[in-house]
Image (cartoon, grey):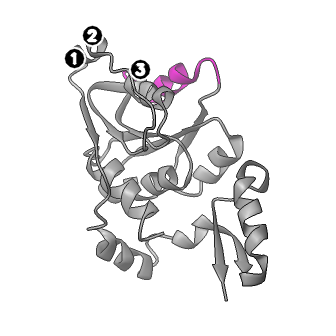
């Protein structure tokens, strides 16, 4: 958790997104990295964290990771629901944590003028950047690869029980259950798995 997902969500999402005290943050994608961004957004004083996903189970889980609100992005009026939770202008910081063109586009739709879009997801396909619509909104778009330079600080917060990373490990297996662990993770939508751990 501390070698990858937590520093990725924090460094590339929260820090690059320049979350400030009082900000409203939307995280598009409630997988482990998105949940890490939700968990750490409070470190920088986010007043509200809106989780977006198409999986209702992941949205339920997000409420235990720092989200204050959730929106099913499969709903036809998802963008209006997000804007209704702000003052109608959109969120201060939109964090993309999936890596799909549609989720990046979603972030650009819900960010307020003067806000930030922090792209965390790894994209395997080209993304359309609608500069003709975005330039006048004066938004910043950031992205990057995690350096894990914040891991020592995050580790201190974990040891002080300020960040509960144990929640990510939803299923535990010993070495005899190796194949079952893979099957559980492969069927995460049915098993409600976030991360599986294998131990001796």
Residue 54 locus on image (x, y percent): 64, 35
Q: Residue at x 71, y 64 (%)?
A: 182
Q: CA distance from mark 1 to mark 3?
A: 19 Å
Residue 185 locus on image (x, y percent): 70, 59
Residue bounds of the magenta highlight: 75-89
Q: Is residue 88 magenta?
A: yes
2 or 3: mark nearer the eye: 2
Residue receiving disc 3:
88
Residue receiving disc 2:
132
Quadrant in the rendering for residue 96: top left
Please give the label number shown on residue 195.
none
Judge by depth and name the residue closer to the eye, 109 or 114.
Answer: 109
Query: Is label 2 in a helix, a strand or a loop?
Result: helix
- Residue 87, compared with residue 43, is above or below; it is above
Q: Residue at x 26, y 39 (%)?
A: 142
Residue receiving disc 1:
135
Residue 130 locus on image (x, y percent): 32, 16
Along the polypeptide, which appears first: circle 2 or circle 3?
3
Q: Is residue 33 magenta?
A: no
């Amino acid at each position: 958790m501390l070698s990858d997902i937590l520093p990725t969500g924090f460094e590339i999402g929260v820090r690059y997104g320049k979350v400030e005290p009082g900000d409203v943050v939307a995280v598009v994608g409630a997988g482990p990295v998105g949940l890490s961004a939700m968990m750490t957004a409070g470190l920088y004083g986010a007043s509200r964290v809106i989780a977006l996903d198409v999986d209702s189970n992941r949205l339920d889980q997000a409420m235990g990771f720092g989200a204050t609100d959730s929106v099913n992005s499969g709903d036809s009026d998802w963008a209006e629901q997000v804007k209704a939770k702000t003052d109608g202008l959109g969120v201060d910081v939109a964090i993309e944590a999936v890596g799909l063109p549609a989720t990046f586009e979603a972030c650009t739709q819900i960010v307020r003028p003067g806000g930030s879009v922090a792209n965390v997801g790894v994209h395997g396909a080209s993304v359309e950047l609608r500069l003709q619509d975005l330039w006048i909104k004066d938004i910043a778009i950031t992205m990057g690869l995690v350096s894990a330079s914040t891991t020592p600080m995050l580790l201190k917060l974990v040891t002080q029980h300020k960040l509960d990373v144990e929640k990510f490990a939803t299923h535990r297996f010993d070495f005899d259950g190796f194949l079952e662990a893979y099957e559980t993770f492969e069927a995460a939508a049915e098993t409600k798995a976030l991360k599986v751990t294998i131990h001796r």
